[in-house]
Image (cartoon, grey):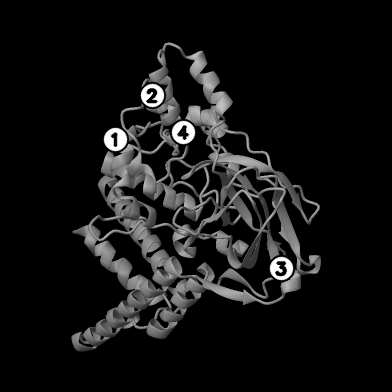
């Protein structure tokens, strides 16, 4: 009972001290009950308005504090050069395959078992979601699923086209594991994270990215070129921080053509202030924000979509194709599909490629890359070339605008808005609410201390 009296006393003293309008009239002497009730209603309405509109302000800060702006100063910035992933139609080196069969007589003791192994390995190397439904059964032999990836890497036909560019930067060809098997990437920062060596060593660390080519309008027309491709091939064009996506356009070119592909480019970048926000606030992810991905050390939009296919295959068919990383960040290993599992996945190839289905629930909430380049095909020209397959690609029409994600509503704006609401409804600022908290807590402790000190003096009085 004494504690309640001290609390009541503290409230009265605090309301007399603070600068928030209206509170003093709740405890002022001489006011009747009707006056106190009117002021209580006014204060309640004010507090409700602050909470309601303040929560809307906070929600805006949490969900949409950024805005996309346009920059037209095209001579002030560089443009990323298109990256590509090229997949040769020839996947397996026949000499390496024969050597492998010869070195494993216990696995393949008969000519029939060797022939089955040849067919199986060649079909396995050409596997993709489009071909899984027709994968042959009964020729697997003694090859175990956990050997598939190593086998494809060891027996890979060496693809060594010559690379040149119209800049001083040197382009290199890097082997990469994709949803169309083992291919080669040019001018990319993600290749090493999707390489067999990186997966084999169970690495999850970030590495120094390759230096990729950027161009400027003053450079003029810039082309890069792959020559002496030796075979027919397929090509995905993408940004340097991306991987191929099987749902996007793929270009197929024969062994006899010299092909030129020209692009238009549009980049969207994110300011440093916006990068300090949470992904849910800026609605995009940086490459080092890969916590949502189980089997990748970095983040990209296409890597996220690839994981959606990974999860869908695992959920529907209880296994994953060999071109996915089978060991995740938590040390959990996932089963690799045998031919029966591949056929199971092949039956739903349309749903798994597009990640859309009218029958199945597919959850794939992937955020865009914060810094991303988009390339649009402007023209493709091919002609028969007596020296074999050659590919030339580049930018001839430089972008006249660049998009940038900027912070427009920061934490300081939230404080200003909420402070303005306090001034509108209660005629005070954040300092007024600070006064209320301070005077109440300090006054309560002081009054309770005085009360117990007085009690102790009474108890010891003779």
Q: Which numbered tag is attached to residue 122?
A: 4
What percent of the width, then of the height, locates residue 231?
Answer: 61, 43
Along the polypeptide, which appears first: circle 3 or circle 1?
1
Q: Which residue is mark 1?
A: 340
Mark 3 and mark 1 residues within 8 Å of each other at the beta carbon: no
Q: Tell me, for residue 396, which label it has, or none.
A: 3
Q: Secondary structure at mark 3?
A: strand
- Which quadrant of the figure contains the C terminus? top left
- Packing grade of label 4 (10 A; few <14, some 14-19, many >=20) is some
Secondary structure at badge 2 equals loop
Dot placed on the residue nearer the N-terminal end, 1 or 2: 2
Q: Position of residue 65 (x, y in %)?
A: 49, 70
**Mark 4 or mark 2, which has the lower sequence index?**
4
- Inter-mark Cα distance, 4 to 3: 40 Å
Q: Secondary structure at mark 1?
A: helix
Distance Cα–Cα, label 1 vs label 2: 13 Å
């Amino acid at each position: 009972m004494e504690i309640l009296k001290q609390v009541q006393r503290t409230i009265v003293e605090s309301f007399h001290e603070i600068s928030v309008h209206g509170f003093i009239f709740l405890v002022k002497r001489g006011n009747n009950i009707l006056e106190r009730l009117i002021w209580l209603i006014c204060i309640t309405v004010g507090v409700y308005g602050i909470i309601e509109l303040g929560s809307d302000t906070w929600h805006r800060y949490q969900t949409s504090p950024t805005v996309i702006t346009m920059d037209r100063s095209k001579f002030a910035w560089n443009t990323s050069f298109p990256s590509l992933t090229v997949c040769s139609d020839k996947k397996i080196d026949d000499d390496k395959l024969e050597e492998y069969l010869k070195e494993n007589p216990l696995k393949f003791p008969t000519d029939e078992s060797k022939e089955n192994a040849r067919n199986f390995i060649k079909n396995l190397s050409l596997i993709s979601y489009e071909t899984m439904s027709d994968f042959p059964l009964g020729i697997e032999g003694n090859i175990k699923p956990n050997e598939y990836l190593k086998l494809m890497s060891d027996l890979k036909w060496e693809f060594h086209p010559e690379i040149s560019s119209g800049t001083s930067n040197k382009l290199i060809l890097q082997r990469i594991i994709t949803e169309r098997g083992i291919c080669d990437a040019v001018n990319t920062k993600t290749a090493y994270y999707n390489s067999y060596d990186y997966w084999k060593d169970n690495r999850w660390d970030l590495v120094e990215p390759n230096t990729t080519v950027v161009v400027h309008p003053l450079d003029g027309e810039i082309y890069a070129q792959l020559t002496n491709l030796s075979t027919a091939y397929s090509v995905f064009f993408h940004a340097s921080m991306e991987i191929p996506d099987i749902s996007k356009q793929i270009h197929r070119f024969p062994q006899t053509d010299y092909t030129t592909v020209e692009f238009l480019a549009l980049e969207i970048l994110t300011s440093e202030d916006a990068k300090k926000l949470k992904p849910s606030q800026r609605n995009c992810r940086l490459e080092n924000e890969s916590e949502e991905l189980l089997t990748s050390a970095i983040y990209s939009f296409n890597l996220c979509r690839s994981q959606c296919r990974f999860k869908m295959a695992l959920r529907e068919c209880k296994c994953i194709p060999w071109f996915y990383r089978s060991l995740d960040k938590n040390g959990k290993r996932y089963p690799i599909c045998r031919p029966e599992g591949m056929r199971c996945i092949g039956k739903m190839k349309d749903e798994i490629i597009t990640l859309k289905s009218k029958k199945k629930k597919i959850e794939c909430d992937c955020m865009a890359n914060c810094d991303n380049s988009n390339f649009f095909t402007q023209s493709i020209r091919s002609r028969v070339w007596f020296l074999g397959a050659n590919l030339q690609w580049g930018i001839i029409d430089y972008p006249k605008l660049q998009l940038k994600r900027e912070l427009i509503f920061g934490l300081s704006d939230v404080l200003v808005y909420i402070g303005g609401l306090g001034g509108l409804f209660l005629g005070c600022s954040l300092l007024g609410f600070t006064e209320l908290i301070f005077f109440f807590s300090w006054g309560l402790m002081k009054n309770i201390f005085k009360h117990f000190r007085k009690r102790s003096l009474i108890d010891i009085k003779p």
